[in-house]
Image: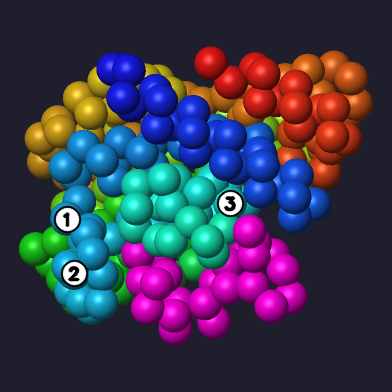
Protein backbone atom coordinates (compact mmCIF):
# COMPACT_ATOMS: atom_id res chain seq x y z
CA UNK A 1 0.00 0.00 0.00
CA UNK A 2 1.50 3.32 -1.01
CA UNK A 3 1.59 6.46 1.11
CA UNK A 4 -1.34 8.09 -0.68
CA UNK A 5 -3.59 5.07 -0.12
CA UNK A 6 -2.73 4.86 3.56
CA UNK A 7 -3.22 8.59 4.09
CA UNK A 8 -6.66 8.59 2.48
CA UNK A 9 -7.81 5.50 4.38
CA UNK A 10 -6.56 6.95 7.66
CA UNK A 11 -8.34 10.23 6.93
CA UNK A 12 -11.56 8.29 6.30
CA UNK A 13 -11.10 6.41 9.59
CA UNK A 14 -10.61 9.64 11.50
CA UNK A 15 -13.74 11.08 9.88
CA UNK A 16 -15.65 7.95 10.93
CA UNK A 17 -14.53 8.38 14.54
CA UNK A 18 -15.25 12.11 14.60
CA UNK A 19 -18.73 11.58 13.14
CA UNK A 20 -19.50 8.78 15.59
CA UNK A 21 -18.31 10.94 18.48
CA UNK A 22 -20.23 14.06 17.41
CA UNK A 23 -23.43 12.20 16.50
CA UNK A 24 -23.29 9.75 19.42
CA UNK A 25 -23.45 6.64 17.29
CA UNK A 26 -21.58 3.34 17.03
CA UNK A 27 -20.44 0.91 14.34
CA UNK A 28 -16.85 2.15 14.13
CA UNK A 29 -15.33 -1.39 14.26
CA UNK A 30 -17.73 -2.69 11.57
CA UNK A 31 -16.74 0.21 9.31
CA UNK A 32 -13.02 -0.27 9.90
CA UNK A 33 -13.34 -3.98 9.08
CA UNK A 34 -14.10 -3.43 5.39
CA UNK A 35 -12.72 0.03 4.62
CA UNK A 36 -9.76 -1.19 2.54
CA UNK A 37 -12.12 -3.40 0.51
CA UNK A 38 -14.38 -0.46 -0.36
CA UNK A 39 -11.41 1.81 -1.02
CA UNK A 40 -9.88 -0.70 -3.45
CA UNK A 41 -13.13 -1.10 -5.38
CA UNK A 42 -13.69 2.64 -5.78
CA UNK A 43 -10.14 3.85 -6.34
CA UNK A 44 -8.32 1.13 -8.28
CA UNK A 45 -10.32 1.04 -11.49
CA UNK A 46 -12.70 -1.84 -10.79
CA UNK A 47 -15.79 0.31 -11.28
CA UNK A 48 -16.65 3.33 -13.38
CA UNK A 49 -18.49 5.42 -10.83
CA UNK A 50 -17.89 9.15 -11.12
CA UNK A 51 -19.72 12.46 -11.07
CA UNK A 52 -20.54 12.13 -14.76
CA UNK A 53 -22.57 8.92 -14.49
CA UNK A 54 -24.06 8.88 -11.00
CA UNK A 55 -27.60 9.43 -12.27
CA UNK A 56 -27.37 6.63 -14.83
CA UNK A 57 -29.58 3.63 -14.17
CA UNK A 58 -27.18 1.41 -16.11
CA UNK A 59 -23.73 1.67 -14.53
CA UNK A 60 -21.33 -0.27 -12.33
CA UNK A 61 -22.54 -0.82 -8.76
CA UNK A 62 -21.07 -1.39 -5.32
CA UNK A 63 -23.76 -2.75 -3.02
CA UNK A 64 -22.94 -2.60 0.68
CA UNK A 65 -25.14 -5.31 2.13
CA UNK A 66 -23.51 -5.28 5.57
CA UNK A 67 -25.44 -2.21 6.58
CA UNK A 68 -23.61 -1.83 9.88
CA UNK A 69 -20.63 -0.46 7.92
CA UNK A 70 -22.67 2.28 6.25
CA UNK A 71 -20.99 5.03 8.31
CA UNK A 72 -17.62 3.95 6.93
CA UNK A 73 -19.02 3.81 3.40
CA UNK A 74 -20.40 7.35 3.60
CA UNK A 75 -17.21 8.79 5.09
CA UNK A 76 -15.05 7.09 2.46
CA UNK A 77 -17.19 8.45 -0.37
CA UNK A 78 -16.84 11.91 1.14
CA UNK A 79 -13.05 11.55 1.23
CA UNK A 80 -13.11 10.41 -2.41
CA UNK A 81 -15.21 13.44 -3.40
CA UNK A 82 -18.24 11.42 -4.51
CA UNK A 83 -20.56 12.95 -1.91
CA UNK A 84 -20.20 16.35 -0.19
CA UNK A 85 -18.53 16.35 3.22
CA UNK A 86 -21.02 18.82 4.65
CA UNK A 87 -23.63 16.03 4.70
CA UNK A 88 -21.59 13.85 7.06
CA UNK A 89 -22.42 15.76 10.29
CA UNK A 90 -26.12 15.00 9.72
CA UNK A 91 -25.50 11.26 10.21
CA UNK A 92 -28.47 9.64 11.98
CA UNK A 93 -29.92 13.06 12.82
CA UNK A 94 -33.69 13.63 12.62
CA UNK A 95 -33.30 16.24 9.88
CA UNK A 96 -30.32 14.53 8.24
CA UNK A 97 -29.95 12.83 4.89
CA UNK A 98 -27.59 9.99 5.76
CA UNK A 99 -28.01 7.06 8.11
CA UNK A 100 -28.42 3.31 8.12
CA UNK A 101 -31.68 3.48 6.16
CA UNK A 102 -30.97 5.53 3.05
CA UNK A 103 -34.03 4.77 0.93
CA UNK A 104 -35.36 8.30 1.36
CA UNK A 105 -31.95 9.90 1.12
CA UNK A 106 -31.33 8.46 -2.33
CA UNK A 107 -33.78 11.00 -3.73
CA UNK A 108 -31.16 13.68 -3.17
CA UNK A 109 -28.86 14.29 -6.20
CA UNK A 110 -25.81 14.73 -3.97
CA UNK A 111 -26.22 11.15 -2.68
CA UNK A 112 -26.47 9.34 -6.00
CA UNK A 113 -23.06 7.72 -5.47
CA UNK A 114 -24.62 5.68 -2.66
CA UNK A 115 -26.03 2.60 -4.32
CA UNK A 116 -29.31 1.41 -2.77
CA UNK A 117 -29.12 0.68 0.92
CA UNK A 118 -30.74 -2.36 2.43
CA UNK A 119 -31.47 -1.40 6.04
CA UNK A 120 -32.28 -5.00 6.96
CA UNK A 121 -29.30 -7.31 6.64
CA UNK A 122 -29.32 -10.01 3.97
CA UNK A 123 -30.93 -8.06 1.15
CA UNK A 124 -27.97 -6.67 -0.77
CA UNK A 125 -27.08 -9.71 -2.85
CA UNK A 126 -30.66 -9.94 -4.13
CA UNK A 127 -30.42 -6.30 -5.19
CA UNK A 128 -27.14 -7.09 -6.93
CA UNK A 129 -28.92 -9.76 -8.99
CA UNK A 130 -31.44 -7.19 -10.19
CA UNK A 131 -28.73 -4.75 -11.22
CA UNK A 132 -26.76 -7.55 -12.94
CA UNK A 133 -29.79 -8.64 -14.96
CA UNK A 134 -30.54 -5.04 -15.98
CA UNK A 135 -26.92 -4.38 -16.98
CA UNK A 136 -25.17 -7.65 -17.95
CA UNK A 137 -22.14 -5.76 -19.28
CA UNK A 138 -21.56 -3.83 -16.03
CA UNK A 139 -19.56 -4.81 -12.94
CA UNK A 140 -21.68 -5.44 -9.86
CA UNK A 141 -19.92 -5.92 -6.53
CA UNK A 142 -21.72 -6.90 -3.33
CA UNK A 143 -20.07 -6.80 0.09
CA UNK A 144 -21.61 -8.95 2.83
CA UNK A 145 -20.53 -9.79 6.37
CA UNK A 146 -19.88 -13.31 7.61
CA UNK A 147 -22.45 -12.82 10.37
CA UNK A 148 -24.90 -11.69 7.72
CA UNK A 149 -24.54 -15.09 6.06
CA UNK A 150 -26.88 -16.39 8.77
CA UNK A 151 -29.70 -14.78 6.76
CA UNK A 152 -31.49 -17.23 4.45
CA UNK A 153 -32.03 -14.60 1.77
CA UNK A 154 -28.29 -14.49 1.14
CA UNK A 155 -28.22 -18.18 0.31
CA UNK A 156 -31.23 -17.88 -1.99
CA UNK A 157 -29.27 -15.24 -3.93
CA UNK A 158 -26.08 -17.37 -3.92
CA UNK A 159 -28.03 -20.33 -5.33
CA UNK A 160 -29.53 -18.13 -8.08
CA UNK A 161 -26.21 -16.56 -9.07
CA UNK A 162 -24.43 -19.92 -9.16
CA UNK A 163 -27.20 -21.65 -11.09
CA UNK A 164 -27.44 -18.91 -13.73
CA UNK A 165 -23.66 -18.31 -13.78
CA UNK A 166 -23.97 -14.56 -13.40
CA UNK A 167 -20.32 -13.71 -13.89
CA UNK A 168 -20.76 -9.95 -13.74
CA UNK A 169 -21.49 -10.25 -10.00
CA UNK A 170 -18.59 -10.46 -7.57
CA UNK A 171 -19.51 -11.43 -4.02
CA UNK A 172 -17.10 -10.23 -1.32
CA UNK A 173 -17.36 -11.60 2.21
CA UNK A 174 -15.93 -9.51 5.05
CA UNK A 175 -14.84 -12.43 7.25
CA UNK A 176 -14.03 -11.04 10.69
CA UNK A 177 -15.50 -14.00 12.64
CA UNK A 178 -17.70 -11.72 14.75
CA UNK A 179 -21.30 -10.61 15.01
CA UNK A 180 -23.18 -8.30 17.34
CA UNK A 181 -22.48 -9.88 20.73
CA UNK A 182 -20.30 -12.91 20.08
CA UNK A 183 -18.08 -14.82 17.69
CA UNK A 184 -19.99 -16.32 14.76
CA UNK A 185 -18.86 -19.79 15.81
CA UNK A 186 -20.80 -19.37 19.06
CA UNK A 187 -24.09 -18.57 17.26
CA UNK A 188 -24.08 -20.18 13.80
CA UNK A 189 -20.66 -20.78 12.30
CA UNK A 190 -20.88 -18.94 8.99
CA UNK A 191 -17.17 -18.09 8.97
CA UNK A 192 -14.86 -21.10 9.11
CA UNK A 193 -16.21 -23.08 6.16
CA UNK A 194 -17.26 -20.28 3.78
CA UNK A 195 -15.08 -21.32 0.86
CA UNK A 196 -16.44 -24.86 0.74
CA UNK A 197 -20.03 -23.77 1.38
CA UNK A 198 -20.22 -21.04 -1.28
CA UNK A 199 -18.04 -23.04 -3.66
CA UNK A 200 -20.64 -25.82 -3.54
CA UNK A 201 -23.04 -23.45 -5.34
CA UNK A 202 -20.77 -23.19 -8.39
CA UNK A 203 -18.70 -20.17 -7.36
CA UNK A 204 -14.95 -19.72 -7.69
CA UNK A 205 -13.86 -18.75 -4.15
CA UNK A 206 -10.58 -16.95 -3.45
CA UNK A 207 -9.23 -16.09 -0.01
CA UNK A 208 -7.17 -12.98 0.75
CA UNK A 209 -6.15 -10.45 3.38
CA UNK A 210 -8.97 -7.89 3.45
CA UNK A 211 -6.68 -5.12 4.72
CA UNK A 212 -3.98 -5.54 2.06
CA UNK A 213 -4.83 -3.38 -0.96
CA UNK A 214 -2.23 -5.04 -3.19
CA UNK A 215 -3.61 -8.48 -2.39
CA UNK A 216 -7.18 -7.28 -2.89
CA UNK A 217 -6.24 -5.90 -6.30
CA UNK A 218 -4.72 -9.22 -7.33
CA UNK A 219 -7.77 -11.31 -6.45
CA UNK A 220 -10.20 -8.77 -7.92
CA UNK A 221 -8.28 -8.85 -11.23
CA UNK A 222 -8.06 -12.65 -11.38
CA UNK A 223 -10.03 -14.12 -14.28
CA UNK A 224 -12.26 -17.06 -13.40
CA UNK A 225 -14.78 -19.19 -15.30
CA UNK A 226 -17.51 -18.97 -12.64
CA UNK A 227 -19.09 -16.24 -10.51
CA UNK A 228 -16.38 -15.03 -8.15
CA UNK A 229 -16.52 -14.96 -4.36
CA UNK A 230 -13.70 -13.24 -2.49
CA UNK A 231 -13.35 -14.27 1.13
CA UNK A 232 -11.53 -11.33 2.70
CA UNK A 233 -10.04 -12.04 6.12
CA UNK A 234 -10.53 -8.90 8.19
CA UNK A 235 -10.21 -7.64 11.74
CA UNK A 236 -13.30 -5.99 13.17
CA UNK A 237 -11.82 -2.69 14.26
CA UNK A 238 -8.29 -3.65 15.23
CA UNK A 239 -7.80 -0.05 16.40
CA UNK A 240 -10.70 -0.68 18.80
CA UNK A 241 -9.45 -4.00 20.21
CA UNK A 242 -8.70 -2.45 23.60
CA UNK A 243 -12.47 -2.05 24.09
CA UNK A 244 -12.99 -5.81 24.01
CA UNK A 245 -10.53 -6.27 26.86
CA UNK A 246 -11.88 -3.29 28.78
CA UNK A 247 -15.62 -3.78 28.30
CA UNK A 248 -17.43 -6.53 26.36
CA UNK A 249 -17.93 -8.02 22.90
CA UNK A 250 -20.85 -5.71 22.12
CA UNK A 251 -18.48 -2.73 22.29
CA UNK A 252 -17.00 -3.92 19.01
CA UNK A 253 -20.36 -3.30 17.36
CA UNK A 254 -22.93 -0.56 17.90
CA UNK A 255 -22.08 0.93 21.29
CA UNK A 256 -20.99 4.51 21.79
CA UNK A 257 -17.80 5.31 23.68
CA UNK A 258 -16.44 7.86 26.11
CA UNK A 259 -14.57 10.90 24.73
CA UNK A 260 -11.34 9.35 25.96
CA UNK A 261 -12.07 6.10 24.14
CA UNK A 262 -12.80 7.89 20.87
CA UNK A 263 -9.48 9.73 21.18
CA UNK A 264 -7.66 6.48 21.90
CA UNK A 265 -9.10 4.96 18.71
CA UNK A 266 -7.75 7.94 16.74
CA UNK A 267 -4.34 7.44 18.34
CA UNK A 268 -4.40 3.77 17.32
CA UNK A 269 -4.88 4.68 13.64
CA UNK A 270 -1.52 4.40 11.91
101 falls in the magenta region: yes
In front of the other: 145 or 86: 86
First-in-chain label (3 vs 2): 2
92 falls in the magenta region: yes
Quarter of the image where one finds residue 240: top right
Residue 120 in view in this figure: no
Q: Residue at x 89, y 20 (%)?
A: 246
Q: Main secondary structure of the magenta part?
A: loop
Indicate left or right for 26 with 100 as reference: right
Indicate left or right for 201 with 237 as reference: left
Distance CA(mark 3)–CA(mark 2): 23 Å
Q: Residue at x 64, y 73 (%)?
A: 96
Distance CA(mark 3)–CA(mark 1): 22 Å
Q: Secondary structure at mark 1?
A: loop
Whole-percent x, y for residue 17 in the image: 66, 39
Whole-percent x, y for residue 210 in the image: 42, 26
Is the residue under label 1 in contact with that under label 3 (CB below 8 Å)? Answer: no
Distance CA(mark 2)–CA(mark 1): 8 Å
Q: Residue at x 58, y 34 (%)?
A: 14
Whole-percent x, y for residue 208 in the image: 36, 22
Q: Secondary structure at mark 2?
A: loop
Question: Image height check: is 226 above or below 103?
Answer: above
Q: Which residues are magenta?
A: 89-114
Write down the residue under mark 3: 71
Residue that extends furthest to the front in the rendered view of this protein? 86
Write down the residue under mark 1: 48
In front of the other: 25 or 250: 25
Is the residue under label 1 in contact with that under label 2 (CB below 8 Å)? Answer: yes
Q: Secondary structure at mark 3?
A: helix
First-in-chain label (2 vs 1): 1
Amino acid sequence: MDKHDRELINNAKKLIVKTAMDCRTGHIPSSFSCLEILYTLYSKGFVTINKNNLDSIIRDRIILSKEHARLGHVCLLAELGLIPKNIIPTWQQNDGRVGHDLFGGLNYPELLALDPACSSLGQGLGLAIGFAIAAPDKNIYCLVGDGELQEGSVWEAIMYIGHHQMKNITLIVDRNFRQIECYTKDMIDTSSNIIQQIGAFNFECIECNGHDIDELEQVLKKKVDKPKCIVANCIKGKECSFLLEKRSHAYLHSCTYTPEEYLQIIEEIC
